[in-house]
Amino acid sequence: MCVTPRLAALFTCVALFAQQPQTKVTKPPVEPVDDTVTFRGRVNIVIAPTTVTDTQGQNVPGLSTADFKLYDNDKLQKIEQDITFQPLSIVVVVQANGKVDGILPKIRKIGNLFEPLVIGDAGELAVISFDHQIKVNQDFTNDPVKIRTAFENIKAGSNTSALIDAVTVGSRMLNRRPKNRRKVLLLIAETRDGGSEGKLREAVTNLDIYNISLYSVNINHMVSSLTQKPAYSRPDPIPATARHMPNGAAVTPETVASMHAVEGQQMNFAPLIKELYIGVKAIFIDNPVEVFTKYTGGKEYNFVTQRDLERAISDIGDRLHAEYLLSYNPNNKMEGGYHTIRVEVGRYGMRVATRPGYWMAAVPE
């Protein structure tokens, strides 16, 4: 083999490069993402969405900060700001499992109702649906066509209903929006959870620390049961002869079913918020939606007909645009635990509604 001077020089360069110590290139370590919520005690600003109505139930506009007195644990607070306007960020969370398949046609028609509720005030809206999984049908947008399309494309899935998980996902989506936005979660679902992996306390904590108001338009459980498509029948894993039956009863699949296939009744507890935060044992709550709405200052509605649903959406819109957003920096941060909020208006006959309170650990000033 004839080696030319140019080729020899190339071999020499390769040999010298191979003798150099090589630097190993490593990627920087990726920090594990902790998606759980850590509840911290410090509360700098508390926002208390407040509605004022007269004796006829009509919203009262035109009030100023001087018209309100706000008490935190019965201690008078200085209202630092009356936020008369904040653009809305709304997440609509729709139950879309097999149980409500017969009701979804009504829900698919309401997309156009959110244009006057959201679009006119520089707002934005996202739509998510859930069965055992959470699906983002539409991320935040102010495009009415995209909003209507998102509702029209909601389809029923499995019979599982991960309601608490869906509220948690929706609240985290809202938390990522700019801080100058009013954050609202609108839930259209049954009031029962059926398969969430997350805990009610985590969902309540998210709503609390992110200053989210939750409104619910409840799907009637009886109606959903009557309109639900029948599930596929599955064989009993326990043979009929292995079931305990009263003396003299015929041991047949029919008699066994009549004796044992009774839908379990769930006890209805109404625990205090304190128990949710510090309870050692898990607490079962038959209606988590009631906890969400009352704790955040929202409201529950019920619907059966299309008109009921449309009226509820319209009333929520009126309520949101009539709210006074009172904010304050608590002067009693040393008082750990549940803080009650009370708002008074110095005018006769006025009815005031606000969030009942929030949870805070004791923090030194």
Image (spheres, grey):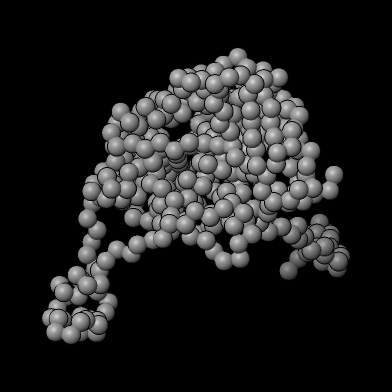
On screen, 89 above or below 204?
above
- From the viewer's perspective, is 1 left or right of 356? right
Residue at position x 51%, y 41% in the image: 293
Residue at position x 33%, y 36% in the image: 303
- From the viewer's perspective, is 71 left or right of 16? left
Q: Position of residue 67 (x, y in %)?
A: 67, 20
Res. 275 image quadrant = bottom right
Q: Can residue 165 be seen in this view?
A: yes
Relative depth, front residue between 227 and 136: 227
On screen, 101 above or below 89?
below
On-image quarter of the N terminus = bottom right
Q: Where is residue 237 in the image (x, y as percent from the top left)?
A: 27, 77
Residue at position x 69%, y 27% in the image: 69
Q: Position of residue 156 (x, y in %)?
A: 33, 47
On screen, 12 above or below 238?
above
Q: Can residue 148 be seen in this view?
A: no
Relative depth, front residue between 39 and 348: 348
